[in-house]
Image: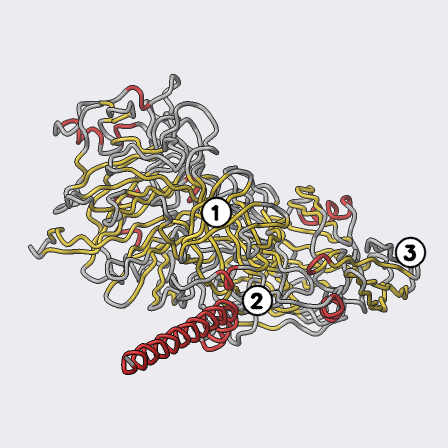
């Protein structure tokens, strides 16, 4: 009995010990869990600090089509441009544009693509004086049979275009990805008419029998001419039929080869190709799909758009994981003010029908706005950086992002959206951008808010990582040109969302659902590189069932006291140049985390509290302006001493007659000098020939003239000269002035809009267009005046443009100037005569008098 009692007691002690140990372990484990939950953000921050800062090398390849060959990515684009990269972040251009002969991709461009150019694209109509080879699609076809009997070739389907509807798609092949590519055939024509017709600056008879259509009819490939190709007046019916550009080639799951193509405004079409020859398998007869879409005997099956509505750059990507074909189309006009943006649809068949997340069809049901059709991936946006926020600059965003291709990695199953974008305050400058996409809970790819930097999804994301302040963007479904700036929201630990919008959120590993105004958005959480903050930040990207995309990126703002906030704002607050002020000041009134800034001026006659400047006459004005910075109960002040420059009377500064030498006729400046093909190069050769008034300078397309520094000082001046260009190349300058490569003005005879403009960039972009392009091999008088922020542009003595908000470029005397050359573009080829520079703005009559002085010559 005693032994049993001892045994029982012993067992009881052991049980108690085990239980106590279990409780202790459990508590320790819970503490560990709590610690992990609480410290996840700190751990993530340490991981971020250990990761390398990504580097980027940018290229300008418009309408990029992507392919991967071995370990290298390639993008091919408009204007016969291409670049390569091994990491999707650092790109190197390897082409030489329209150079011919010795074109990198096509050898003798004119001769190689001659058959396509007979219809469009070379020295014709809108391509008069040059080429228009656009939007190539690069594609590896293992089945293609080469002339030597071998199989496999890189196929490049290019677009040759002369007007918004008269175009052709041809293709060329190569055994090497970097070329050269040899022409094979022209396979689709558009813009033809019923009867003989010609475009301006064109010798091409647009009558349909001047295409390959008669040959196809004679061979029985198509049934005959379709009267519906033409409107009642015999012109091309571009409501229902496409502009033949923007080809995209893809295999379906059954290894059939397809081409989708088209642009404004008759819709996007689909044709099957013979995968061994590349020939089109035209339908031959007209028909209709089961869901009522057009099948045209020649153009194929309509899969998107129509009714004069925008839509171009189609791209179909098959996803083997879910069996869907995803169709991407870009709406809008490509320039920065054109509301260019990408839409998305999907289908279980390559032939459609394609629908968006709301079930809306890609093919428009009638003459209605296309704004509500298609998932909108992104539009014009900017992630604003407020004064006092971490990082540098004003923020990052895009204008008119579009014309995309897609790369799906079969090994990693990563997917990338590849497109070109323009940028806020940078005019028409464009660059390639790559954003990773991730499949959401409903089988729709959603786009990372920032460019690719090597990020990947992480299923260990916890609540502590997610909570915090975000910059939030709702891209909407509109076709607006509005630049949508980020707003501030905060995600809280209890699953609520507050700030400029209110809602709720929940997550499951990296998947996230965000509900705002009773609409739920489905997407992912992913850490991305924020170039403004200069760090990796957590972000979300999500799509609603209505096809609206939302983005959010953590601000990088951590807990700061009110005093710390105002002190940071004070430290970062700048108002620009204060020693030679000639135009209105920008005085910020808001800053980071609700900070308010108010201003006081010691002399409101000269500088008002809103920054408006009234320049005194004949003498400088000195003004003290004071900023009061407030956040909650914390306040600091910052004082600026501002010197305002007086207005001056108009006077001649310099006259370079170019009458056999490079001297300034006024004697105020030293002689100009000859440069090479850039304003800061040596070499070059400038000769002289008969001009309007004595002799004129001859520019050979490889040389320029470096003018003396300091020709223009202040914000009131006039530039006047005569030009007679022999060749037009885009962006080539006739007169160039700069403070540095990021702050300049240029008289451009042939600009990105095909017009003559006064162009200014690149910290702020400004286009002052003449509304037309001057003629080649004819003398034209070009002049512009600047008075404060008002610019006026004159061609042959007549005012063609007046605008405000022209940027101030020359407030100090260290500007430099040139004729025929800048830092980047092809030098001017032609004649220039009689350059005049004035301090002050000549009147309209005085500019007309300058023109009339030599007009009769």
**Is label 1 or label 3 in front?**
1
Most foreground residue, 671 or 91: 91
Q: Earlier in the sequence, mark 1 or mark 3?
A: 1
Image quadrant in which you'd find residue 254 = top left
**Is label 2 or label 3 in front?**
2
Q: Residues within 10 Å of mark 3 (few under 14, many from 20)?
A: some
Per the image, the residue denoted by label 3 is 604
Secondary structure of the residue carrying tag 1 is strand
Which percent across, then down, holds residue 512? 44, 51
Most foreground residue, 655 or 132: 132
Per the image, the residue denoted by label 1 is 378
Which percent across, then down, holds residue 53? 47, 73
Which percent across, then down, holds residue 829? 50, 59
Q: Is residue 271 left or right of residue 459?
A: left
Which residue is located at x 83 percent, y 62 percent? 628
State whether residue 854 appears in this view: yes
Secondary structure of the residue carrying tag 3 is loop
Q: Earlier in the sequence, mark 2 or mark 1?
A: 1
**Is label 2 or label 1 in front?**
2
Which residue is located at x 29 percent, y 25 percent? 293
Residues under labels 2 and 1: Cα distance?
A: 21 Å
Instruction: Say how the picture is coloured.
Output: secondary structure
Per the image, the residue denoted by label 2 is 533
Residues under labels 1 and 3: Cα distance?
A: 44 Å
Q: Is residue 560 left or right of residue 94?
A: right
Most foreground residue, 129 or 688: 129
Q: Is residue 797 left or right of residue 160?
A: right
Q: Earlier in the sequence, mark 2 or mark 3?
A: 2
Which percent across, then down, holds residue 366? 41, 23
Most foreground residue, 249 or 484: 484
Q: Is residue 615 left or right of residue 73?
A: right
């Amino acid at each position: 009995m005693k032994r049993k009692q001892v045994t029982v007691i012993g067992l009881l002690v052991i049980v108690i010990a085990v239980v106590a140990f279990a409780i202790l372990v459990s508590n320790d484990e819970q503490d560990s869990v709590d610690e992990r939950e609480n410290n996840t953000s700190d751990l993530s921050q340490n991981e971020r600090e250990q990761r390398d800062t990504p580097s980027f090398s940018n290229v300008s390849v418009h309408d990029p089509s992507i392919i991967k060959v071995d370990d290298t990515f390639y993008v091919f684009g408009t204007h016969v441009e291409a670049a390569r990269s091994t990491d999707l972040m650092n790109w190197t251009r390897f082409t030489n544009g329209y150079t011919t002969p010795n074109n990198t991709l096509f050898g003798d461009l004119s001769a190689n693509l001659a058959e396509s150019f007979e219809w469009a694209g070379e020295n014709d109509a809108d391509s008069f004086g040059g080429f228009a080879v656009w939007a190539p699609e690069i594609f590896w076809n293992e089945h293609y049979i080469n002339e030597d009997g071998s199989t496999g070739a890189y196929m490049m389907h290019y677009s040759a275009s002369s007007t918004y509807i008269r175009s052709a798609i041809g293709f060329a092949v190569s055994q090497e990805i970097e070329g050269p590519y040899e022409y094979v055939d022209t396979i689709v024509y558009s813009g033809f008419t019923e009867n003989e017709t010609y475009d301006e600056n064109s010798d091409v008879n647009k009558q349909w029998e001047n295409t390959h259509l008669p040959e196809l009819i004679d061979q029985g490939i198509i049934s005959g001419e379709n009267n519906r190709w033409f409107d009642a007046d015999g012109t091309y019916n571009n409501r229902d039929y496409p502009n033949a550009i923007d080809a995209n080639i893809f295999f379906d799951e059954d290894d059939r080869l397809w081409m989708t193509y088209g642009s404004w405004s008759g819709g996007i079409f689909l044709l099957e190709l013979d995968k061994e020859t590349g020939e089109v398998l035209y339908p031959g007869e007209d028909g209709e799909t089961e869901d009522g879409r057009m099948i045209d005997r020649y153009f194929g099956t309509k899969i998107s758009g129509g009714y004069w509505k925008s839509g171009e750059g189609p791209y179909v990507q098959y996803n083997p994981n879910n069996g869907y074909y995803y169709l991407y189309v870009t709406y809008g006009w490509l320039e920065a003010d054109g509301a260019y943006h990408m839409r998305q649809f999907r289908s279980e068949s390559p032939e459609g029908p394609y629908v968006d997340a709301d079930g809306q069809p890609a093919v428009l049901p009638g003459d209605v706005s296309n704004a509500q059709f298609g998932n909108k991936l992104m539009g014009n946006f900017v992630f604003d950086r407020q004064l006092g926020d971490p990082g540098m600059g004003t923020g990052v965003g895009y204008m008119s992002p579009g014309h995309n291709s897609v790369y799906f990695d079969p090994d990693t199953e990563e997917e990338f959206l590849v497109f070109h974008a323009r940028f806020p305050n940078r005019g028409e400058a464009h660059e390639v951008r790559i954003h990773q996409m991730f499949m959401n809970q409903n089988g729709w790819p959603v786009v990372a808010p920032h460019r690719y930097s090597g990020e990947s999804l992480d299923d260990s994301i916890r609540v502590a990582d997610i909570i915090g302040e975000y910059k939030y963007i709702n891209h909407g479904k509109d076709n607006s040109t509005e630049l949508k700036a980020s707003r501030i929201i905060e995600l809280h630990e209890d699953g609520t969302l507050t700030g400029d919008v209110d809602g709720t959120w929940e997550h499951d590993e990296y998947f996230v659902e965000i509900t705002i105004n009773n609409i739920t958005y489905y997407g992912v959480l992913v850490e991305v590189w924020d170039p403004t903050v200069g760090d990796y930040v957590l972000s979300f990207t999500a799509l609603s069932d209505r096809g609206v995309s939302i983005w959010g990126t953590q601000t990088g703002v951590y807990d700061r006291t009110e005093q710390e906030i105002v002190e940071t704002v004070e430290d970062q607050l700048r108002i620009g140049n204060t020693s030679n002020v000639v135009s209105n000041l920008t005085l910020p009134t808001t800053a980071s985390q609700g900070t308010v800034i108010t201003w006081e001026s010691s002399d409101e006659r000269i500088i008002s509290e809103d920054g408006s400047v009234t320049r005194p006459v004949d003498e400088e004005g000195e003004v003290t302006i004071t900023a009061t910075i407030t956040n909650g109960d914390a306040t600091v002040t910052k004082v600026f001493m501002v010197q305002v420059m007086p207005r001056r009377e108009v006077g001649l500064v310099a006259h370079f007659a170019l009458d056999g030498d490079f001297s300034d006729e006024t004697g105020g400046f030293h002689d100009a000098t000859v440069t090479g093909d850039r304003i800061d190069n040596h070499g070059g050769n400038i000769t002289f020939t008969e001009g309007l008034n004595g002799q004129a300078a001859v520019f050979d397309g490889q040389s320029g003239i470096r003018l003396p520094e300091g020709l223009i000082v202040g914000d009131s001046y006039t530039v006047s000269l005569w030009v007679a260009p022999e060749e037009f190349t885009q962006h080539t300058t006739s007169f160039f002035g700069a403070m540095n490569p990021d702050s300049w003005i240029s008289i451009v005879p042939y600009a990105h809009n095909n017009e003559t403009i006064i162009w200014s960039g690149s910290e702020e972009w400004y286009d002052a267009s003449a509304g037309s392009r001057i003629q080649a091999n004819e003398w034209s008088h070009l002049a512009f005046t600047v008075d404060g922020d008002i610019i006026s542009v004159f061609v042959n003595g007549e005012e063609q443009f007046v605008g405000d908000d022209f940027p101030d470029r020359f407030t100090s005397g260290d500007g430099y100037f040139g004729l025929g050359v800048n830092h980047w573009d092809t030098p001017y080829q032609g004649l220039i005569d009689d350059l005049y520079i004035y301090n002050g703005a000549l009147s309209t009559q005085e500019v007309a008098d300058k023109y009339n002085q030599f007009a009769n010559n």
